[in-house]
Amino acid sequence: AHQWRGVIREYADRLPVTESTRVITLGEGGTPLVHAPALSAHTGNEVYLKVEGMNPTGSFKDRGMTMAITAAVEAGAKAVVCASTGNTSASAAAYAAQAGLTCAVLVPDGKISIGKLSQAVAHGAEILQVDGNFDNCLDVARKLSEAYPVFLVNSVNPARIEGQKTGAFEVVDFLGDAPDYHMLPVGNAGNITAYWKGYKEYAAPFTTNTGEELAAVSTKTPTMWGFQADGAAPIVKGHPITEPETIATAIRIGNPASWEQAETARDESGGLIDSVTDEEILAAHRWLSSKEGVFVEPGSAAGVAGLLKHHAAGDAPEGKTIVITVTGHGLKDPQWATQGLDGGSVVEPTKVAFDVVAVADALGL
Ligand code: F0G
């Protein structure tokens, strides 16, 4: 049987690699596009979830990181650095471990989930907990890579965008054409940039890196809907947010590096970038786990929160094919399954004696 070979080997003719490139891969990509029956019925669309938590380190970052670490090795780098709200650092640490590179990660102190931090620890990264937010971390990481011999693997590195555009390729390859709408969370805005690049590339003839002419794969590109968290919504508000706040720590970003590219994706596709509250994010997170069987981390649910918000307002699409990227695994930040916004428990544990009748009673059987 065919085993998925990771995004670089699967899409080599559309990525900046050659036959002699040493590919650093953990088998990322090839993630399931799961039909979401409850969201489909509720909104009157065919809704699919691109479940990126199924990547090797549990988030979509792996698509970009296989390319970025491969490029770092090709450039002869000995060390890589990134700023991160958690997932990028987990991914960079894992791929750097395989490549034998030193990996330094700059994370906002106290604002990254324990699951993500433990991944960076496990993979042997140098972890610097910065007294500042993600935007401060990225600023320092950029300056460090300009002044010292370390290779920056944030999404401002074009290799990251190249790798992440494969998410769009997989959607089209699976559905047979582009969807009508693509919805996703927006943080540093690399992923919306990458998806839009991938969709545009697949909708036009393409000359591969070996000079082969490929026909267009899809007949259209989707309308892009991106969602920021309300307390961290610089693109929606039209200015950087100096103190971004949201429980969705993955997207707690006040000054996205790919701001302009995100606006280009929005405008060229006739789409929108909007915000969702922490309440809406947590409600979407619960919807996914309880109705669709898909467990994601809170920030990952922003796209679903956006669809539900616009459906409630009466201005969501109907009768369309909608793909929503859910970006990271629920086990990254599991506390939100059992805890509400006020910090209180949302589960009432049922205590029972080790007795079959007592258990049956407790279950109402
Ligand atoms: N969802 C998750 C789970 C993320 O970790 C991120 C970004 C996003 C969405 C937003 O994607 O930045 O491309 O717009 N996390 C970065 C990190 C910032 O450091 O892990 P984006």
Image (spheres, rainbow, N blue to C red):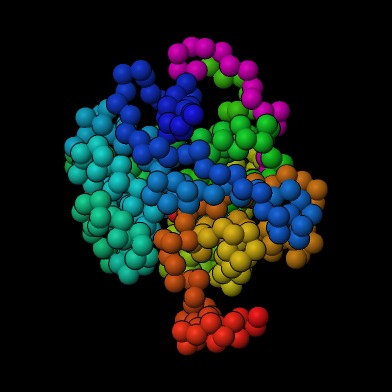
**What residue do we see at 71% from left, 59% from top?**
38
**What residue do we see at 46% from left, 32% from top?**
3
Residue 49 picture location, percent across and down: 61, 50
Q: Quadrant of the C terminus?
A: bottom right
355 or 68, which lies in front?
Answer: 355
149 or 303, which lies in front?
Answer: 303
In this rendering, the answer to whether 107 lies above or below 324 is below
175 or 255, which lies in front?
Answer: 175
Magenta highlight range: 208-225
**What residue do we see at 32% from left, 70% from top?**
110
Residue 134 picture location, percent across and down: 37, 59
Can the viewer see residue 237 in this picture? no
Residue 81 picture location, percent across and down: 27, 46
User: Which residue is farthest front?
Assistant: 356
Can the viewer see residue 89 in this picture? yes
Q: Quadrant of residue 26?
A: top left
Q: Is residue 27 left or right of residue 151?
A: right
